[in-house]
Image: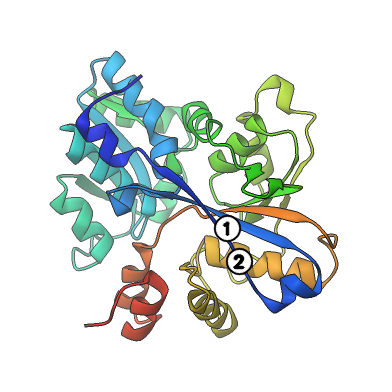
């Protein structure tokens, strides 16, 4: 497919971590967390898998780079910017924002990586899946490949489907669990595996099941999967002190998560275990989708302290 020294820097290495916790012992649950680490932190987790076949399309179609969409603190935008810089490609993004705040660490990183940024108000941003709107943007950026928000497309799901999340170091998982926002990661998980798949919704989006279904292969449409929407809370990117405290507790167990995606997902899993909705003696595989760069944005917005930033990211406060 794609082979170069640069690609090797962003090709992830799979790492399993078994979480030890009294609740898991009480319910006789094995909980394994799958990490995908790269030498470029912004492209860790699920990011490269969702981008690799888009990058291949760029090469095959002789495009100059990638055009995409994302929020002002988007992990996806950082990943696209980092990948394109590394591979010598252009990148551009329409950002869900009235104005571009270049003091925002996410947007600052994207700009430093050479990404061209355009502000798009929330009303206009809702048109990002409208074919006429997409056509207008494609006419404006003729040399760039259009990649959907989050990299969630058939290409993105195909990349995720290359990852074996079912075979933990101590046996096959009964349930594979992942955060779900734009749907591509969950679709790829379902396409790859035959065991039950559970997406924990981190956004309020009633179209999410349909988005996932559209990315499933024909043979995957009868598989057992579901999306749990009970843990979104006040919405995407929002969290309370209890969830933040849970993320701090996970850090004490050497598991570093943020409260937007993986942290919210793990807290949901713990709640489902405590309530008996996940059967005792289950072996769980939870996909850590990365995104720790987003912690800088939370600190920038005053939502976490500098101590939290250091603790949750696994760094040392200076």
Q: Mark 1 packing: few (<14 Cα in 10 Å), some, or many (20+)?
A: many
Identify the secondary structure beneath mark 2.
loop
Which mark identifies residue 195?
Answer: none
Q: Position of residue 58 (x, y in %)?
A: 29, 22
Task: Give the quarter of the figure containing the C terminus.
Answer: bottom left
How far separated are the C-alphas under marks 2 and 1?
26 Å
- The residue at 72%/27% (across/down) is 220
Seen in the picture, residue 285 relative to 269 is either above or below; the reply is: above
Report if residue 53 is visible in the image. Answer: yes
**Is residue 85 found left or right of 55 in the rendered image?**
left
Seen in the picture, residue 109 relative to 8 is either above or below; the reply is: below
- The residue at 27%/49% (across/down) is 40
The image's colour scheme reads rainbow
Q: Which residue is mark 1?
A: 203
Task: Give the quarter of the figure containing the N terminus.
Answer: top left
Q: Mark 2 packing: few (<14 Cα in 10 Å), some, or many (20+)?
A: some
Q: Which residue is mark 2?
A: 19
Q: Position of residue 120 (x, y in %)?
A: 32, 50
Report if residue 211 is visible in the image. Answer: no
């Amino acid at each position: 497919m794609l082979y170069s020294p640069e690609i090797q820097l962003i090709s992830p290495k799979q790492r399993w971590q078994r979480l030890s916790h009294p609740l898991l012992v009480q319910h006789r649950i094995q909980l394994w967390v799958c990490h995908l680490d790269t030498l470029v932190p912004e492209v860790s987790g699920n990011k490269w898998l969702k981008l690799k076949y888009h990058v291949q399309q760029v090469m095959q179609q002789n495009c100059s780079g990638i055009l995409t969409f994302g929020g002002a603190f988007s992990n996806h935008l950082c990943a696209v910017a980092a990948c394109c810089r590394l591979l010598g490609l252009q990148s551009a993004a329409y950002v869900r924002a009235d104005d571009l705040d270049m003091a925002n660490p996410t947007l600052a990183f994207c700009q430093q990586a050479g990404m061209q940024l355009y502000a798009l108000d929330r009303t206009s941003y809702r048109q990002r899946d409208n074919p006429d709107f997409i056509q207008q943007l494609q006419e404006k950026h003729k040399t760039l490949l259009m990649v959907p928000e989050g990299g969630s497309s058939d290409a993105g799901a195909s990349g995720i489907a290359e990852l074996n999340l079912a075979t933990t170091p101590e046996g096959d998982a009964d349930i594979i669990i992942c955060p779900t926002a734009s749907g591509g990661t969950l679709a790829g998980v379902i396409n790859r595996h035959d065991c039950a798949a559970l997406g924990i919704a981190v956004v309020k989006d009633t179209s999410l099941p349909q988005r996932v279904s559209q990315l499933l292969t024909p043979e995957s449409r009868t598989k057992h999967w579901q999306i749990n929407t009970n843990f979104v809370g006040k919405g995407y990117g929002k969290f309370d002190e209890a969830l933040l405290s849970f993320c701090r507790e996970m850090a004490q167990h050497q598991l570093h998560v943020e409260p937007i995606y993986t942290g919210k997902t793990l807290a949901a899993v713990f709640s489902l275990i405590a309530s008996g909705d996940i059967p005792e003696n289950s072996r769980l595989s939870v996909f850590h989708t990365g995104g720790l760069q987003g912690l800088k944005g939370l600190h920038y917005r005053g939502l976490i302290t500098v101590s939290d930033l250091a603790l949750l990211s696994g760094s040392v406060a200076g």
